[in-house]
Amino acid sequence: MDELQDLRREIDAIDRELVELFRRRMDVTARVGEYKRARGVPVLDQERERQVLQNKGELAGEALRPAVVTLYQTIMALSRRQQRDMLGQGADNPGVLRWREAQDGARRPVAAPRVVYQGVPGAYSEQAALDFFGPQADAAGLEQFEDCFSALREGRADYAVLPIENSSTGAIRQIYDLLTQYECYMVGETTVKVEHCLMALPGASLEGITHVYSHEQGLFQCERYLNAHPNWKQVPQADTAGSAQMVAGSGDRTKAAICSARAARLYGLEILAHAINHNTRNTTRFVVVSPRLEQRPGADKISTLFVLPHQAGSLHEVLTVFAVHGLNMVKLESRPLPGQSWQYMFFLEFTGAPGDPAVNDALHELAQTTGEFRVLGWFPSNLG
């Protein structure tokens, strides 16, 4: 134990030297920032940073090269942040200004709201809406995801409840794309356990089925079960409950639908097989989208989107922001930018309370570090 204490004291002594050296380095980078400000020189010199990382890696030797490169990526990210603060970069970022305006115009949750979802009664999206707003909610189904966003923009609805990711099949790309196109805010979330059933008209049998209808996600989530019936033709539909509605109206016992047991009850269908999705813990996360930012008690999750320059280390610099401020990043999703090859927009969620100085600093630094930047909202985490 004495030997361990001696080693720890030795580490403490080395750390004191490192901290002093880091302080001296930051003093010098501050002077570099003054030079750049006086001469209008950009903060980032990508070729210079690439050379620095290469040189430091070579100094470290083969064994320590990856660790030293990571260390200096972080150090240089902190130096850039310091210099951006000196130059005032990011303070007038359109995303920051838009966020401040949204905060000033934030509303309280709407009482007796009008809620829309994609699909027809019996859809998992309807279930999510009823779970979030209560069984007496005024909830209406629309044909397409974009119809829900249009209803919000045009004032025909107060909220939309939309699926954003599934534990089996991942992100639902249409929702991410629409969030970039519409000026809306995420103000809540909920989850629904997905238990797909195979259903058909009363009197139908598994042996007589020739066609199976469902949303493409439903078909994929039941792939193993369907593979055991190779003669069945799989037909993608706009939504799961709509498939049940269509089968019910067809009068054809050779057709079957994959959707929820609730949909079977609503449309008078008979369940031929329960729980046919191969992941028994299959869950879909839904987000509650509003045309205005809201002040909801217990908000502890913040959602953002941003574009990064196509250069080495840009994502690492973003991740450093959260490490420096001790904030927990809980979600990172990327989507290609339309019309721009190999360029991506990122959706990032992290935990933190609005008004927390660490959160405000992190948002400010994200605006400095990224290209297009936008806060999509804050809301209470609800992933039980």
Image (cartoon, rainbow, N blue to C red):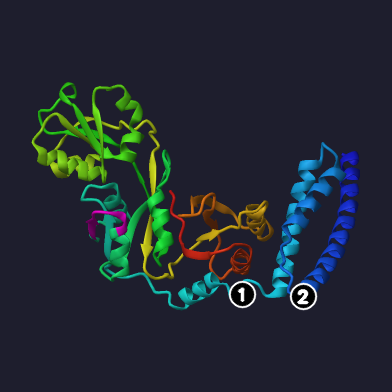
Point 54% across, 60% down: residue: 306
Q: Is residue 18 left or right of residue 362?
A: right
| The magenta stretch spans residue 267 | no
Locate residue 363: give its quadrant.
bottom right
Q: Earlier in the sequence, mark 1 or mark 2?
A: 2
The residue range painted magenta reads 139-146
Point 30% across, 64% down: residue: 150
- Could you classify mark 2 by the number of other residues whose Cα lies within 10 Å: few (under 14), some (14-19), or many (20 or more)? few
Q: Pointer 2: what residue?
A: 39
Question: Along the line of sight, which residue is nearer the eye, 132 or 67?
Answer: 67
- Could you classify mark 1 by the number of other residues whose Cα lies within 10 Å: few (under 14), some (14-19), or many (20 or more)? some
Q: Is residue 234 above or below residue 16?
A: above
Locate residue 214: give its quadrant.
top left
- Residue 201, percent from left and from top: 12, 34
Residue type at mark 1: give it.
Ala
> Of the numbered discs in the image, which one, if any, rests on residue 238?
none
Callout 1 secondary element: loop
- Residue 175, percent from left and from top: 39, 54
| The magenta stretch spans residue 143 | yes
Question: Along the line of sight, which residue is nearer the eye, 173 or 355?
Answer: 173
In this view of the protein, can residue 301 be seen by the observer?
no
- Residue 5, percent from left and from top: 88, 44
Residue type at mark 2: give it.
Arg
In this view of the protein, can residue 159 be seen by the observer?
yes
Number of the front mark, 1 or 2: 2
Q: Pointer 1: what residue?
A: 91
Q: CA distance from mark 1 to mark 2?
A: 20 Å
Q: Is residue 292 left or right of residue 114?
A: right
Q: Is residue 123 above or below residue 39?
A: above
